[in-house]
Amino acid sequence: MRIARKFITVVAVGLAGLGLGTAPAHAEPETPYAPTMIILDASGSMRRPDPAGTMMDAARNAVRTFVDSAPATAHVGLATYGTGTGNDEAEKAAGCRDVQILRQADTLDRAALTDAVNGIEARGWTPMGTALRETAAALPADEPRSIVLVSDGEDTCAPPDPCDVARELKQQGVDLTVHTIGFAVDDAARTQLTCMAEATGGSYSDAADGAALERMLPKVTTAALRDYQAAGTPITGTADYADAPVARPGHHLDTLGQHEKRFYAVDVPQGATAYFSGIMSYPRVSDVSIVDDYNTLETRVYGHDGTDCREREREQAGRSSDGVTLTVSETWRGAAEEGRDATDQCAGAGRYYFSVEWDNVSEGVPARLPLEILVGIEPAAIDPGPVAVLPATTFVPPTTATQPVTGGGSFNSATTLDGSGGYSDILRPGEYVFYRVRLGWGQGLAYRVNFEANDARGLSAVSNITTTLYSPLAEEIDSDSHVYTGSAGMLPTGDSAIATVPIRYNNRAADQADVREQSVAGWYYIAVKLGSAAADGQTPVPVHLDLTVAGTAESGPTYADDTGNGVLGEGKAPVTSAPTATGAEAEPRRGLVLAAVGGVGAAVILGGALLIALRRRRG
């Protein structure tokens, strides 16, 4: 029995998830930001007093603060309700239809958005359900998108009930995430707003007053622009192995409940290697005790008749409330082994069963969450190719001009880095961005991440920085984290670079665990994270990623049954392309990330960050 335990210490960090795409190396670039609409409550109750003047004054200030700091290529729109009527019974019928789309979610126009929000006056009713439905319809229908709704109370116009509308949109397969902010709300409104967010996989946040809203709205909306969106072919796992659906090579999407275990069947040919990964992204949740803030995923392998093959992987992530994505990966080689006897159910070709269980559960998370399942089948190798494990790739500082790029919000939208060179990006606190590099047989990579100094000082500058390297099969190869205080820094700390060895089939027999994960050619992923600042700072940080791709191309293994479909089924049909960074004009595709958007105590940030500074995973 093999048990893997990775204790991922995260302080104000969200690990974004794996949506492992199979796009070609060169593709048409797009912007990585999800079209996002802000819905602002302008009901009569927003005329209540606030230290900023009225609650409406505070809400306008919060939107302006976000608009001033939003990425220039973001797609942001604005909607409101309650401005066209009064809030007496005589005007209720009209007031409950009073939803206005003030600005479509087009490329950011700061002046137009500011003018629009300045003109909002609080007067009428609160048709949240209708506003949610109409705003969702106004967003592009062919890509992931987000809504951030700010309200000071419950819907006063139902039907439609806003939580029912959120569920309806999700059930229709609408690729939409709703984040809600309760502005000085009572328990009933908080429950309704939380339900809307959880129904779509979004987050709920509390803002007690105008000052809190001015801090919270920019964080939540910035996170929504690169929100993590689960993806894959729909599949429904079962509670018993005998009824499990067959999961073929590729990327599948299910849901999993707290403390639930689901089974999936995988047909494994003789001599083949099966890869199975479970991927779950946890939404940001406020005010969670650090001792109750961890989640665990576990996979197990079962034989042809459901016999426990005593093979499992267990992964645990701390600080899940910061928007962590947790992955657990199993490599099964039982089909390449001879059984102890004819009754051995865990050897040879046949149908095996893989389970995923959401074991430990952190405080405040939804009852169910999306679960991505990644399945790969690698045929037996007649000739595995070169045997020796070569030294790690040597990092060579780039000599060409740095290319501006914009990282994607998840592995689904990771921006392709087109070989050796320097690449620059800008990260805002709470963002975790992804890039990918294609490695063929015999090739390896090495990279460094440099964080520039910014103008922030004091606790508003204190956060942690992280980079992680993943294999094509959703396994973490290496990572490094350190404290960021507003001064320039580099990852990895103390090493020349994070690097792979040249990719060879026989690396799977290496003594080092991280080298064994470097035995399949394909997309390797680099993730870079800037944690949320200790004191709600929002100052962006310029980042430089210096990359070396080297090694002599090799033919790789000769497979016994090479259908050309690829390990992950990527050769079976065309798939959506991801962007390639080839120069300053490259504008990568839209993507989403659920970033960490909540503040935590400065003592926790500083203490946790110091712990992270000492942590480095290797092998």
Image: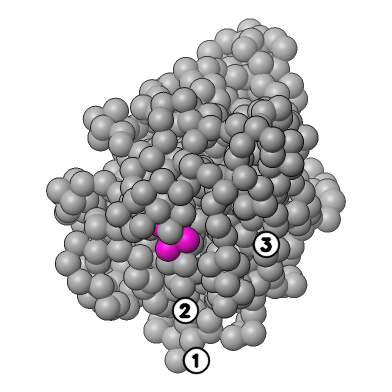
Question: As drawn, which residue projects farthest toward the bottom?
Answer: 400
Residue displayed at 58% across by 55% down: 38
Q: Position of residue 613 (x, y in %)?
A: 21, 57
Identify which residue, 484 or 102, lies in the foreground: 102
Give the Cα separation between the discs numbered 2 and 1.
Answer: 10 Å
Q: Position of residue 600 (x, y in %)?
A: 26, 46
Identify which residue, 244 or 348, lies in the foreground: 244
Vertical relation: 347 (above or below) 21 = above
Residue bearing the label numbered 2: 424
Vertical relation: 297 (above or below) 434 = above
Q: Which mark is residue 102?
A: 3
Of callouts 2 and 1, the N-terminal one: 1
Of callouts 3 and 2, the N-terminal one: 3
Vertical relation: 368 (above or below) 551 = above
Q: Which residues are magenta?
A: 58-62
Query: Which of label 3 and label 1 is nearer to you?
Result: 3
Residue displayed at 47% across by 79% down: 424
Q: Quick check: marks 3 and 2 in contact, CB under 8 Å? A: no
